[in-house]
Image (cartoon, rainbow, N blue to C red):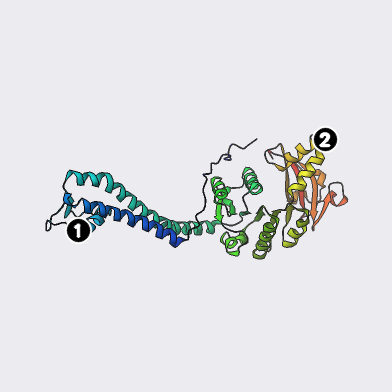
Amino acid sequence: MADPNIPTKFTVALRRASKLPVWADVLLRLSLAFFLILLVIIIHWFDRAGLKDNHDGVISFLDVVYFTMISVTTTGFGDIAPVSDRSRFIEAIIVTPVRIAVIFIFVGTAYNFVIKRSWEKWRMKKIQQTLSGHIVTLGFGVSGSQAVNELIKRGTDPKDIVVIDSSEERLAEAEYLGCNILCGDGTRDEILNAVRIKQASSVIVSAGRDDSSILMVLTVRHLSPNVPISVVIRADDNELLARQAGATTVINPVSFTGLLLASSCHGEHISEYLTDLASVGGEVIIKEREVYPSEVGKSLRDLPEGIGLRIYRNGVNFGFWQPEAQKLEAGDLLVQILPTEA
């Protein structure tokens, strides 16, 4: 059942990224603005009889250009003014919309290429100052988005999640959830440094392709030697490569799906329970934590709450039935099943 606190609907408009370079985009905008100004100059020239020059009474071509510029820029000194009904009608119906269009073009250009970029740089700097102990998600496809949604359901603040993807539509969805977003390539050092990868608490890699995911793992491990990295790998042959690249946890969704299918053949409720364990929306949840000081010396079977399944001691795991699990030691990591309310 979906969590009512998590937005589940998102509408994306169909669009295509512009391939124009910045200078070409600026030139195109300015060309449109000057074309509109030239159009107004031509209109004023043919309607110059309806204009009055309070200086010398003669309307020259220079006067027309001058009047057009002060009219379009809304300066309006008043030395030249429309006096005939037709001229005033032209000013109201034709020139005024052109004036508004030209203003929007110049203001929009200034916003996109100066104000917006300065604002975004300032905002990015402010966000970077607060990034510490955050979770970085490289790739916001099916697996990445599901992981982020599950993290939020488990209580992770969206502000503590950074999503990196090359798709603006996917990033818009992540931003809608409240996450920090960055459009870029997760294999680039400058992109990962921009999200302070060294201060991250963990990294999730789900690039959609095994080769891209492994390259991202290599880059992350190069920049942050100790951060835990979980990666989605779809081909069995690439699991070892991902671990050699530095991945802490390798998840193969294809293999896991096969396990669920096989389990369902031996009991119709087994796969349901495993799914319940994996999701915070179920009745029970699986948790990994360090042994509490009050639990040292006790058996894994004697936990005050939940059911202990396994301990990890010095990189080796022991099941609840093994002798090593009968006496917990400080520093042990244990995996247990708890009711979701706990």
Q: Identify the residue at horizontal 81%, vertical 44% (top origin).
A: 302
Amino acid type, mark 1: Asp
Q: Position of residue 91 (x, y in %)?
A: 24, 47
Q: Position of residue 287 (x, y in %)?
A: 72, 46
> Is residue 240 or residue 319 the one in the foreground?
240
Q: CA distance from mark 1 to mark 2?
A: 91 Å
Q: Position of residue 98 (x, y in %)?
A: 31, 49
In the rendered view, does 188 fall on the left or right side of 288? Answer: left
Which residue in the protein does label 1 denote? 63
Q: Nearer the viewer, mark 1 or mark 2?
A: 1
Q: Which sits earlier in the primary sequence, circle 1 or circle 2?
A: 1
Q: Secondary structure at mark 2?
A: loop
Q: Identify the residue at horizontal 73%, vertical 40% (top origin).
A: 275
**Residue 114 in view (yes/no):** no
Q: Quadrant of the N terminus?
A: top right
> Is residue 150 or residue 55 the one in the foreground?
55
Which residue in the protein does label 2 denote? 267
Question: Residue 117: which disc?
Answer: none
In the rendered view, does 181 fall on the left or right side of 272? Answer: left
Q: Identify the residue at horizontal 45%, vertical 58% (top origin).
A: 117
**Residue 181 in view (yes/no):** yes
Q: Position of residue 196 (x, y in %)?
A: 58, 60
**Extreme front residue here?**
46
Amino acid type, mark 2: Gly
Label 2 near label 1: C-beta < 8 Å?
A: no
> Is residue 41 or residue 149 the one in the foreground?
41
